[in-house]
Image (cartoon, helix red, strand yellow):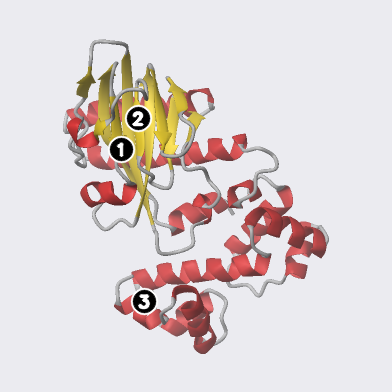
């Protein structure tokens, strides 16, 4: 089981490109909060991550209260939680609202020129929406702003070529270009996450760090592959060929919750997804996530989300 892919599917990750910028120093603009820009780019989205791919030149980025980061050609700047941030050729310049640079529309990928007469930076910006009403292990313990050197990664040149292709394709208004650009954007975000996982410090806690640990990653894979199975820590440890105490301690240290607590929450995430899609009756959904009775499932769901499964589905959550 590919756990990262499973989670990204479950939280219904979707993305798109929204700015094809031809920037000339000096330039500096402020990117709004993801929840605000979502009203234009993805109405109804509760969470919106933002990525900026630097195709040429370099730029700086900063979220309030934290140190600035510098990105060179081939790097991706990521604001995974949708924090408002400043982006520019230099952060000493006064930042204008992003609306002065571009009126974000989706799709709208015609190249936009902005700035002065100085050094050139080619910048492609993308957004990524994901479910905000369910626990999201991918975004836990991940920085508010970071960079990934995309061009130095094995898939980097291919992704960069794909971005350039879809920009040209969108400009020609070829049928299907919007869908193609969206899929390339999602591939970009997934590769950024993979790069972040591989570059994390060895002692960095969090669910993503767990994917690098041989015992924890195997435990996660087993639970995600068969979430309805009557797992115990002993059964998981036996499958992984380690001791119960080693697995429990390591899993809790990295993921932040014991294995059975994590499994219980993940089952509720899956159940919420099934309820959104209205897949079957409540008894069938309860069985599908490992509950022998509908009553037990109802109690567990209400503990997690504060409402009954029926109310959740009725409210269109």
Which residue appears at 46% of the width and 77% of the height? 285
- At a point 57% along the width and 85% down the height, the residue shown is 292
Which part of the image, by quadrant, shows the N terminus? bottom right
Q: Is residue 117 depicted above or below 262 in this figure?
A: above
Which image quadrant: the C terminus? bottom left
Q: Residue at x 48, y 23 (%)?
A: 151
Residue at which label 1 appears? 31
Q: Is residue 246 left or right of residue 164?
A: right
Disc nearer the start of the sequence (3/2): 2
Q: Nearer the viewer, mark 1 or mark 3?
A: 1
- Residue 239 visible in the snapshot: no
Q: Which residue is mark 2?
A: 87
Q: Position of residue 53 (x, y in %)?
A: 38, 29
Q: Which residue is mark 3?
A: 312
The residue positioned 57% from the left and 53% from the top of the image is 3
Under tag 3, what secondary structure? Answer: helix
């Amino acid at each position: 089981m590919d756990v990262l892919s499973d989670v990204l599917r479950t939280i219904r990750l979707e993305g798109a490109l929204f700015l094809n910028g031809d920037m000339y120093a000096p330039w500096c603009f402020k990117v709004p909060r993801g929840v605000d820009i979502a009203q234009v780019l993805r109405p109804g989205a509760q969470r919106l991550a933002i990525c900026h791919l630097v195709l040429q030149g370099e730029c700086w980025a900063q979220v309030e209260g934290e140190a600035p980061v510098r990105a060179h050609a081939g790097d991706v700047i990521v604001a995974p939680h949708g924090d408002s941030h400043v982006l520019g050729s230099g952060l000493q310049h006064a930042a204008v609202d992003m609306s002065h640079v571009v009126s974000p529309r989706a799709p709208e990928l015609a190249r936009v020129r902005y700035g002065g007469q100085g050094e050139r930076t080619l910048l492609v910006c993308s957004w990524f929406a994901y479910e905000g009403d369910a626990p999201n292990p991918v975004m836990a313990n991940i920085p508010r702003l970071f960079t990934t050197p995309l061009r130095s990664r094995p898939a980097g040149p291919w992704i960069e070529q794909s971005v350039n292709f879809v920009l040209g394709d969108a400009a020609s208004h070829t049928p299907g270009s919007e869908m193609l650009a969206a899929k390339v954007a999602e591939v970009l975000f997934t590769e950024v996450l993979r790069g972040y996982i591989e570059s994390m410090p060895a002692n960095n806690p969090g669910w993503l760090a767990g994917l690098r640990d041989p015992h924890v990653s195997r435990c996660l894979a087993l639970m995600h592959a068969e979430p309805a199975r009557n797992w115990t820590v002993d059964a998981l440890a036996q499958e992984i060929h380690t001791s119960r105490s080693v697995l429990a301690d390591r899993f809790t240290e990295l993921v932040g919750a014991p294995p059975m607590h994590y499994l219980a929450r993940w089952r509720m995430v899956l159940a919420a997804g099934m309820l959104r899609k209205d897949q079957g009756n409540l008894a069938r959904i309860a069985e599908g996530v490992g509950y022998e009775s509908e009553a037990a499932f109802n109690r567990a769901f209400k503990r997690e989300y504060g409402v009954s499964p029926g109310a959740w589905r009725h409210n269109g959550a």
